[in-house]
Image (spheres, rainbow, N blue to C red):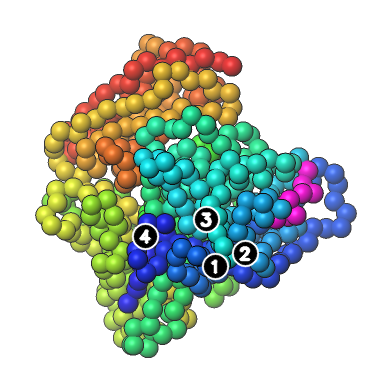
C-alpha cells in the first residue's frame, strides 16, 4: 500500500512538505592541493526541511532526498571541493545568508556554487501571498522570498546553480503563470535556476508503508522531482540527461530530460535553452560499472504523450539489466488534482518464471515491451493520466520514469488564443513569456514569425500539453530572442503563431504584433 502526498502548504491533512537532512557536515572529494588560478571549483549546499511548526514531520523522505543529491554530485568527474549538508536546521533568512556565505564565500568568478533547497512552497497572489519557501526546525519557522534568497546569493562570485524542489517553485523565476510579475528575480547571467513545478502547481512526494505481506522493509520515501533530478545526473542510472553522450550535462539537457521523465509537475528553468555545463561525469567509466552497481531498469521509452479515449493504449519499452520486480503506477486527474490516493499499482504480469519465482511483477533480464490500457474516470472526454514505471529490489522502491499522457478529444471548440507582451528587449537575460489558452488538452505548435511571415524560431511542434493549473486552461512558453540557428533575432516586428490539434482538426491563431528592440 502506498500513500501519495502533495508537498505544499495546502496539501493533504495528514502530511505534506519536504525536507531537511539533519545530517553531518560533509566535505567530500577535496580539490587537489595545487590548482591553477581560474580552474573551476564546485561547491554544493544541500538544504531540506523535515520538521515544521505548521505541518507534520515528513521524515525520512527528505533525508533520502538530500542524500540522493549528495550521491549524484559525488559522481562528478570534476570533484566537488565541498558538499555541505547542514547539521542544524535553518529558521530565517539571516541564518540562510550566513550559511550561504560560509559555504560559498571563497568562490571566485570561475567557480560554481550549487544550492539545493526542498521544502514547503507558497504562492497565492489572488490572496496577497507572494512566492516563498518555508524554513523550520519544528519549533520556529519563517518563509523566505525570492528577494531574500537572491540577496543572500548576490555577494557570491561566479555562477550560482539554484535547484528548488517545492510547490509553486516556478514563481521564484516567474514561470508557469499566465502573466509574469513586474519584478523578476535571478535574471542575470550568474544564475542558473531549475524549479520542480510551475507557479500554480504543487510538487509531490511519496511514502511507502508496510502492507502486512512481507513488504515492511519498503518504509521509505522520495520526492518525484529530486529522484528524477539525481538519477538524470548519476552514472549509476545511465546519466540519462546527457542526450548527446559527451560526458557533460548542460542546463538545457537536464531540463529536457526532466520534462520527459518527471510527470507529477512541470519543471521550469531559467535561462531557457542554456548550454552551461551543470554536471560532468566519466563517460568511459560508466561503461565499466558492474551490473550490480547500475540501475536495474534503463532505456525507458513511452510510445506517445497523447492518446484519445477511443484509442487508449500506451506502449512502453525498457531494458531490465538483471532480474527485478516491476510495476506501473497509473494516476488519474480530476478537478485539477492528481488522485495519488486512488492510484493503481499494476505489477508486470507477462513473465511467470524468473529468479524471483512467482512474486508479483517479476521480470527477467532483457528488452521489454509492455502495453497498458488506460481509462478516464467518470466518462470524461478529455484529461490527463500520469504513468510511472517503478522497480522493487532489495526492499527498495524506485521510480524510474513518468510520463504525462494527454487524453485529447477528436474535435471541439479549442478556444485557442495567445497572449504576450507588446514589446521585447532581449539583452541576454530577459525572455519573452508567451501564454497559450486552450479549452482542452491538445497538441500545440508554436513559432515566432518575422514581419514577412517567415519562421524565425520554432518553440515546439505538435507537442502535447501538460496540466499547469492555469485558469483558464493554458500552456506557457518562453523565447530568449534567438533564431533557429542560435543567433540573436534582429530588431523588428514579430508575431507568435500557434496551431492547436484535436484529432484531425487544426486551429491556428496569431498573437498581436511584438516589437523587438535591441538594447
In the rendered structure, does residue 105 fall within the stretch colored magenta? yes
In the rendered structure, does residue 465 fall within the stretch colored magenta? no
Numbered disc 4: secondary structure:
loop
Decide if residue 8 is on the left or right side of residue 489. Answer: left
Q: Which residue is mark 3?
A: 134
**Of label 2 and label 3, which has the lower sequence position?**
2
**Of label 4 and label 1, which has the lower sequence position?**
4
Q: What span is colored magenta in the figure?
A: 99-108
> In front here: 323 or 383?
383
Is disc 2 in contact with disc 1, using a CB cutoff of under 8 Å?
A: yes
Numbered disc 1: secondary structure:
loop
- The residues bearing labels 2 and 4 have C-alpha atoms spaced at a distance of 23 Å
Looking at the rendered image, the quarter that the C terminus falls into is top right
| Nearer to us: label 1 or label 3 | 1
**Camera sees residue 268:** no
**Of label 2 and label 4, which has the lower sequence position?**
4
> In front here: 327 or 166?
166
Residue 218: image x %, image y %? 43, 79
Residue at the image point whose x is 48% and y is 70% from the top? 57
Would you call the spot at circle 2 few (<14 residues within 10 Å), some (14-19), or many (20 or more)?
A: many
Would you call the spot at circle 4 few (<14 residues within 10 Å), some (14-19), or many (20 or more)?
A: some
- The residues bearing labels 4 and 3 have C-alpha atoms spaced at a distance of 14 Å
Numbered disc 2: secondary structure:
loop
Q: Which residue is mark 2?
A: 89
Residue at the image point whose x is 68% and y is 40% from the top? 154
Looking at the rendered image, the quarter that the N terminus falls into is bottom left
Reply above or below: 397 against 89: below
Q: Which residue is mark 1?
A: 138
Amino acid at each position: 500500500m502506498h500513500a501519495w502526498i502533495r508537498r505544499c502548504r495546502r496539501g493533504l491533512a495528514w502530511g505534506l512538505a519536504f525536507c531537511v537532512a539533519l545530517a553531518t557536515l560533509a566535505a567530500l572529494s577535496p580539490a587537489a592541493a595545487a590548482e591553477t588560478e581560474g580552474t573551476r571549483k564546485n561547491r554544493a549546499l544541500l538544504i531540506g526541511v523535515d520538521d515544521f511548526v505548521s505541518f507534520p514531520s515528513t521524515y525520512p523522505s527528505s533525508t533520502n532526498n538530500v542524500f540522493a543529491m549528495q550521491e549524484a554530485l559525488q559522481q562528478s568527474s570534476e570533484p566537488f571541493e565541498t558538499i555541505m549538508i547542514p547539521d542544524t536546521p535553518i529558521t530565517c533568512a539571516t541564518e540562510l545568508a550566513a550559511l550561504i556565505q560560509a559555504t560559498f564565500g571563497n568562490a571566485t568568478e570561475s567557480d560554481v556554487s550549487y544550492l539545493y533547497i526542498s521544502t514547503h512552497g507558497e504562492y497565492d497572489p489572488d490572496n496577497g501571498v507572494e512566492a516563498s519557501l518555508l524554513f523550520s526546525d519544528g519549533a520556529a519557522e519563517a518563509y523566505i522570498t525570492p528577494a531574500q534568497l537572491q540577496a543572500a546569493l548576490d555577494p557570491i562570485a561566479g555562477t550560482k546553480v539554484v535547484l528548488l524542489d517545492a510547490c509553486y517553485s516556478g514563481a521564484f523565476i516567474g514561470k508557469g503563470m499566465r502573466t509574469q510579475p513586474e519584478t523578476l528575480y535571478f535574471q542575470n547571467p550568474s544564475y542558473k535556476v531549475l524549479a520542480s513545478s510551475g507557479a500554480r502547481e504543487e510538487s509531490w512526494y511519496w511514502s511507502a508503508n508496510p502492507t502486512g505481506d512481507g513488504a515492511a522493509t519498503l518504509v521509505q520515501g522520495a520526492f518525484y522531482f529530486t529522484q528524477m533530478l539525481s538519477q538524470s545526473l548519476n552514472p549509476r542510472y545511465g546519466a540519462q540527461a546527457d542526450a548527446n553522450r559527451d560526458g557533460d550535462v548542460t542546463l538545457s539537457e537536464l531540463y529536457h530530460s526532466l520534462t520527459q521523465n518527471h510527470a507529477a509537475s512541470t519543471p521550469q528553468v531559467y535561462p531557457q535553452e542554456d548550454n552551461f555545463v551543470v554536471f560532468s561525469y566519466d563517460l568511459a567509466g560508466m561503461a565499466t560499472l558492474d551490473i550490480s552497481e547500475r540501475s536495474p531498469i534503463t532505456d525507458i521509452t513511452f510510445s506517445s504523450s497523447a492518446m484519445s479515449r477511443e484509442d487508449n493504449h500506451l506502449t512502453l519499452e525498457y531494458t531490465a539489466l538483471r532480474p527485478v520486480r516491476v510495476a506501473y503506477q497509473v494516476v488519474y486527474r480530476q478537478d485539477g488534482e492528481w488522485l495519488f490516493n486512488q492510484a493503481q499499482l499494476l505489477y508486470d504480469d507477462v513473465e511467470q518464471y524468473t529468479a524471483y519465482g512467482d512474486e508479483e511483477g517479476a521480470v527477467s533480464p532483457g528488452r521489454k515491451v509492455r502495453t497498458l490500457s488506460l481509462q478516464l474516470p467518470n466518462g470524461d472526454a478529455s484529461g490527463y493520466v500520469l504513468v510511472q514505471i517503478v522497480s522493487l529490489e532489495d526492499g527498495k522502491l524506485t521510480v524510474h520514469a513518468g510520463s504525462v499522457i494527454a487524453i485529447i478529444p477528436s474535435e471541439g471548440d479549442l478556444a485557442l488564443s495567445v497572449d504576450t507582451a507588446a514589446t521585447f528587449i532581449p539583452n541576454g537575460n530577459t525572455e519573452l513569456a508567451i501564454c497559450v489558452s486552450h479549452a482542452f488538452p491538445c497538441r500545440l505548435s508554436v513559432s515566432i514569425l518575422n514581419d514577412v511571415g517567415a519562421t524565425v524560431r520554432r518553440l515546439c511542434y505538435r507537442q502535447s500539453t501538460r496540466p499547469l493549473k492555469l485558469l483558464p486552461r493554458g500552456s506557457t512558453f518562453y523565447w530568449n530572442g534567438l533564431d533557429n540557428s542560435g543567433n540573436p533575432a534582429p530588431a523588428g516586428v514579430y508575431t507568435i503563431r500557434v496551431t492547436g490539434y484535436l484529432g484531425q482538426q487544426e486551429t491556428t491563431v496569431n498573437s498581436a504584433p511584438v516589437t523587438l528592440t535591441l538594447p
